[in-house]
Image (spheres, rainbow, N blue to C red):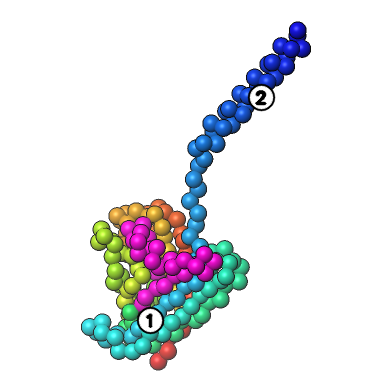
Amino acid sequence: MKNLNYSFLFVLLITFVFVMGGCTSDDPEIEKEQEIITDVTLAFTEVDNNNNPVGNPVEFKAFDPQGLELGNNPTIQTIQLGIGKRYLLEIDLFNSIENEDITEEILEEADEHQFFFLGTAFIGSPVLNYIYADEDKNGNPIGLKGYVQVSSAPGFNNAQFRLILRHDLNKSFPGANNPNWQNFVQAGGETDLDITFPLVLTP
């Protein structure tokens, strides 16, 4: 009789474990995955003082088949811009692993994304000045399009063009509307892209 009672208790214990396990597995935590970006294209089109195009776009690319934030051997081209010239900069992002147009996704969720422009090209003794030329539905900047003014008398011709894409940030945070804001992490969110292009200025 005692053996029967022990067997019955054992069965109850096993049943309890399975029931509790089933309850906890019904509501798994959903982890947000980082956006995979394999290709970045920066297209610079020279414009006049009224922002009218005066030349054809020149493209500079960075790519890594494993993802620019995940791979170990990205290919990054050197940006070459003319001293004293003004450009329209358009950024295009792509995920070749999933064949996804990341630029389109950013436009669809524009209020959650923003680019920042740092590195020695913009900070310290800057040779470039960037102005946002696009905005989301709330009137806050995005950075897929903007104007870049190159210094007419740069102190040096070589610099670092650091491009950062933040996701889920608070765009109303003080300072977040500054494209060269070094404390961008204070606005919260996560980094989808942080890549540095070499920059060379030419006469």
Which residue sits furthest top? 1
Residue 19 seen = yes
| Circles 1, 2 touching at the beta carbon (< 8 Å) | no
Residue 79 at x, y percent in the picture: 46, 81
Q: Secondary structure at mark 1?
A: strand
| Disc 2 residue type (three-letter) | Ile
Residue 132 at x, y percent in the picture: 30, 70
Magenta span contains residue 74: no
Quarter of the picture holding the N terminus: top right
**What span is colored magenta in the figure?**
89-117
Q: Is residue 134 above or below residue 5?
A: below
Left or right, residue 50 beside residue 20:
left
Q: Is residue 92 above or below residue 114?
A: below
Which residue is tagged 1? 44
Q: Is residue 94 above or below residue 34?
A: below
Q: Secondary structure at mark 2?
A: helix
Q: Nearer the viewer, residue 90 or 1?
A: 1
- Snapshot quadrant of residue 14: top right
Which residue is tagged 2? 14
Residue 115 at x, y percent in the picture: 38, 65
Residue at (47, 73) in percent of width and height: 40
Residue at (46, 59) in percent of width and height: 191
| Disc 1 residue type (three-letter) | Phe
Residue 184 at x, y percent in the picture: 39, 59
- Snapshot quadrant of residue 113: bottom left
Q: CA distance from mark 1 to mark 2?
A: 66 Å
Quarter of the picture holding the C terminus: bottom left
Disc with the residue nearer the chain's start (1 vs 2): 2
